[in-house]
Image: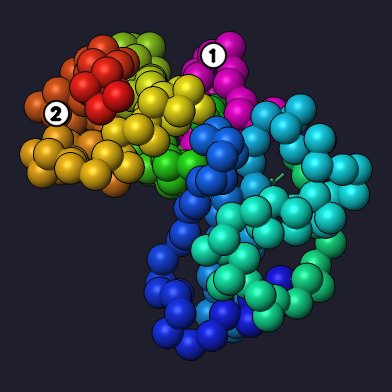
Amino acid sequence: MGDGIEPGAFDRNKIRITVHPQQVDVWYWLIPFSDGRSSIGVVGRSEVLDAAGEDPEARLRAFVSQESSLARLLRHATWDTPVRQISSYATDVAALHGPGFALLGNAGEFLDPVFSSGVTIAFTSSSLAASCVDRQLSGHAVDWEREFAIPLRRGIDTFRCFVEAWYEGTFQRIIFHPHPNAEIRRMICAVLAGYAWDERNPFVQAPARRLAALAELCA
Ligand SMILES: Cc1cc2nc3c(=O)[nH]c(=O)nc-3n(C[C@H](O)[C@H](O)[C@H](O)COP(=O)(O)OP(=O)(O)OC[C@H]3O[C@@H](n4cnc5c(N)ncnc54)[C@H](O)[C@@H]3O)c2cc1C
């Protein structure tokens, strides 16, 4: 869309993620481009989105109108791009490697776009695989499961715990808490910034348990 966002109203170097004011598992992205255009989208359970009508553009515009900060930012927008929809975008595979192949990035796993894990997973899988391929081509025995798949899945599973907490609504309780603890905030931000493999971080060591306990405290 031509976003029509007024200069200074929004930091165009940042992607904006917002949450529906009533339905905590419905979220929006606004990705600004350099030419006054943006990508806008809404994510939610299909029964929630479907209830807003059949026409995808009308549905998206209805959801945007319900989130006041987005509605204000986009009040001069030109909706000139056909609105598309996809369902079940998360993907998983039975095996990340096999004779003569290893699956990297989106080809191996696509979790969910909410926390920008895609590029981190793509780079980490490439880096792990490159080291295995290098050693294999040098004639060394490589245990792809132990040296590639297991370490890769460790970080993916950390991200997955955060994604699941988001759709349960408990993660919103944590990040929107009015009095965040600076140290915990730092640990959580580190995971979301891609350090999902850093075992020194308690939220990497035991993400599900830590997030559940913290959500209880924030209730
Ligand atoms: C709008 C949008 C915003 C995103 N924002 C973020 C973000 O902020 N942070 C983040 O971490 N992730 C983000 N992602 C996800 C991220 O882009 C992907 O997870 C990441 O690029 C995956 O890397 P990849 O190398 O696995 O796949 P890709 O980057 O998709 O690369 C695959 C390449 O293979 C090529 N290709 C496909 N088929 C063939 C073929 N048959 N022959 C030859 N080449 C082929 C494609 O053209 C493409 O260049 C975003 C994705 C989208 C669509």
Please name the predominant secondary structure of the magenta segment in the image.
Answer: loop
Residue drawn at point x = 75 percent, y = 58 percent: 61
State whether residue 142 appears in this view: no
Q: CA distance from mark 1 to mark 2?
A: 28 Å
Using the rendered view, name the quadrant where residue 8 is placed: bottom left
Instruction: Classify mark 2: helix, strand or loop.
Output: loop
Whether residue 133 sits left or right of residue 27 in the image: it is left
Residue 36 vertical placement versus 23 (above, below): below
Magenta residue check for 117: no
- Percent from the top left, x then y, of residue 47? 76, 27
Using the rendered view, name the quadrant where residue 194 is placed: top left
Quarter of the picture holding the N terminus: bottom right
Checking the image for residue 160, the label placed there is none
Q: Which residues are magenta?
A: 87-107
Q: Nearer the viewer, residue 60 or 1?
A: 60
Residue drawn at point x = 63 percent, y = 82 percent: 4
Instruction: Classify mark 1: helix, strand or loop.
Output: loop
* Callout in the foreground (1, 2): 2
Q: Closer to the N terminus: mark 1 or mark 2? A: 1
- Percent from the top left, x then y, of residue 155? 32, 26
* Residue corresponding to mark 2: 201
